[in-house]
Amino acid sequence: MGHTIVEKILARAAGRDAVSPGDIVEARVDLALANDVTAPIGIAEFEKAGFTKVFDPTKIALVPDHFTPNKDIKAAAQAKLIREFAKRHGIKNYWEVGRVGIEHVLLPEQGLVAPGDVVIGADSHTCTYGALAAFSTGVGSTDFAAAMAWGRVWLRVPDTIRFVYHGRPSRYVGGKDLMLHTIGLIGVDGALYQAMEFTGPAIKRMSVDGRFTMCNMAIEAGAKCGLVGYDETTAAYLQGRPAGSRGRDGGVELNSDPDAEFIREIDIDASAIEPTVAMPHLPSNTAPAASLTDVRIDQVVIGSCTNGRLEDLHQAAELLRGRTVHPDVRLIILPGTQQVCLDAAADGTMQALIEAGGAFSTPTCGPCLGGHMGVLAEGERSVSTTNRNFVGRMGHPGSEVYLASPYVAAASAIAGHIATPDMIGASGARSGSNAGGRS
Amino acid sequence: MIFEGAAHAYGRDVDTDVIIPARYLNSSDPAELGAHCMEDIDADFVARVRPGDIIVAAENFGCGSSREHAPVAIRAAGVSCVVAASFARIFYRNAINTGLPIVVCPAAAHEARTGDTLRVDVVAGVVANLTQGTSHQADAFPEFMQELIAQGGLLPYVKARLAAEGAA
């Protein structure tokens, strides 16, 4: 009997020949991360339990990205606490404002995640790194504290649902649309406790940036992790990364065996998927963007750990270049990292977005969770390339979030209501210097 | 562990953003978090809840963010345990790891109404609804999680493991 990617990674990390769904394993941790919201509880628990030493200061990452640059005095105290902890324990993977980025964009960019790794993070979107054929999952602060001391984590080996995306998506349909469509199909607990493996011709052709977006939102279907098998696209991406502070030599090639056992296989015709929007107040509440043109909006957010990579900004700029943001709309761009900022500045993307009327932010999770840098008032609506549209997610409990791709977000910013690229007169030609993205 | 208290019943997909909104996550002080528990789904919850009361919810309780502030806020608000048809996986881990008693019992979760008096035996896994005169058997925890619970949570477990390995 063959094995899935997850089973292979967890068997190796647990020092076993093989594992099966339902087994509880203790897996060696290659990277444990937390941020300025979740690390303070983790650090407090670590110290309260009497631990004085971390298992390996090179395998821990502390990323102050949520409420930084410090939004208020309490947030500043939390950032200070993790800074001091990082210094005290010699934690190498710590970045100050000016170098820090949004954790799930930053860590792969820095070469800190490799195929076959086991990554746990005190942040639910840690599942992002499955795009590199790693096992990565979100946990709480206490799990993070335990991993800092122990270097291991207890995990139940999950069943895997295999999603096969056939066909070629249409011009303005990308990873975000495929994922919103999928969550709409199976529901917000449709993959509860399970792994989602994304495969098929449409995934084969998808950039790593698009794959990050899909794996990032696996948690929105309740999944433990999302994964894409290792292929030449993964290899090319990893070639472009720095070796990372752990000086690892690469990683391993991973794919599910042909005779691996999946709990469910779902075939999806990617060519039939339209630009898709998740309406308030669940990511599964999906509808074609074209059916929502009567929804007027106050704000558009493009960026975040879901869609804050260079390809995402390229897509936004492709529509916004030479056009202007609707007078009633505030457009906020949240690049994932300073490197994304620099790349966007170098190739004219940043200029196009600013000239169109967008505000370019420093990398921060900020408005995605209603923290700062774009909080909504009662009754306001935002189209956002982020990942959650729960009640009160971006501000007042009486505000609304519509989740969408960078293309739909940019088109909506121009139109002043939810719109598709076709509606704002985009040509649809597959050309131009910015069409390809990083990979 | 037997808890008796009034039920506060909710539907499915209660997310951690409504359990404790992110605008309060600039603090990890339990009292402060508890004062805003359930604020965006039930604005009067903190005013109504009495020590020992029980939160009851349908499927996927605690979905969304990994914030451990959610189980912390629930405990600090005085809630004794949470009964749900199912839990989102990170919330489930967080509850086990931090010692918030939770019970998976779809029949009891779907039946309970706000104000019903519940009696929950967490160890035996029995949820009795004293108001409706019913009783249901909950799903059993896997053996490993029972061990974690018995040791008082994840960190005492890890400490014991490290001590044993150091001694070996």
Image (cartoon, coloured by chain):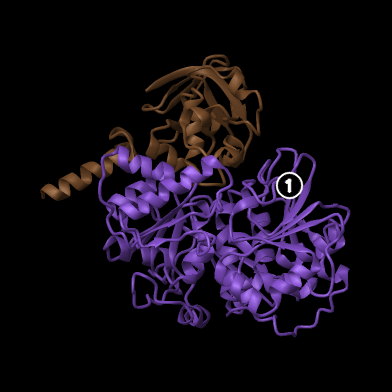
A377 vs A108, left or right, is right
Q: Residue at x 41, y 49 (%)?
A: A82
For the N terminus of chain A, the image quarter is bottom left
Q: Quadrant of residue A334?
A: bottom right
A113 vs B59, left or right, is left
A166 vs B4, left or right, is right
A266 vs B164, left or right, is right
SS at mark 1 in the image: loop
Specify the subunit that label 1 lies on.
A
Residue B164: x and y, percent?
A: 16, 45
Residue A64 visible in image:
yes
| Disc 1 target residue | A280
Q: Quadrant of residue B13?
A: top right
**Chain painted in purple in the figure:** A
On screen, residue B5 above or below A73: above
On screen, residue A393 above or below A202: above
Q: Residue at x 52, y 29 (%)?
A: B32
On screen, residue A262 above or below A431: above
**Chain painted in brown in the figure:** B
Residue A140: x and y, percent?
A: 44, 46
Q: In terms of depth relative to the viewer, which is nearer, A55 or A118?
A: A55
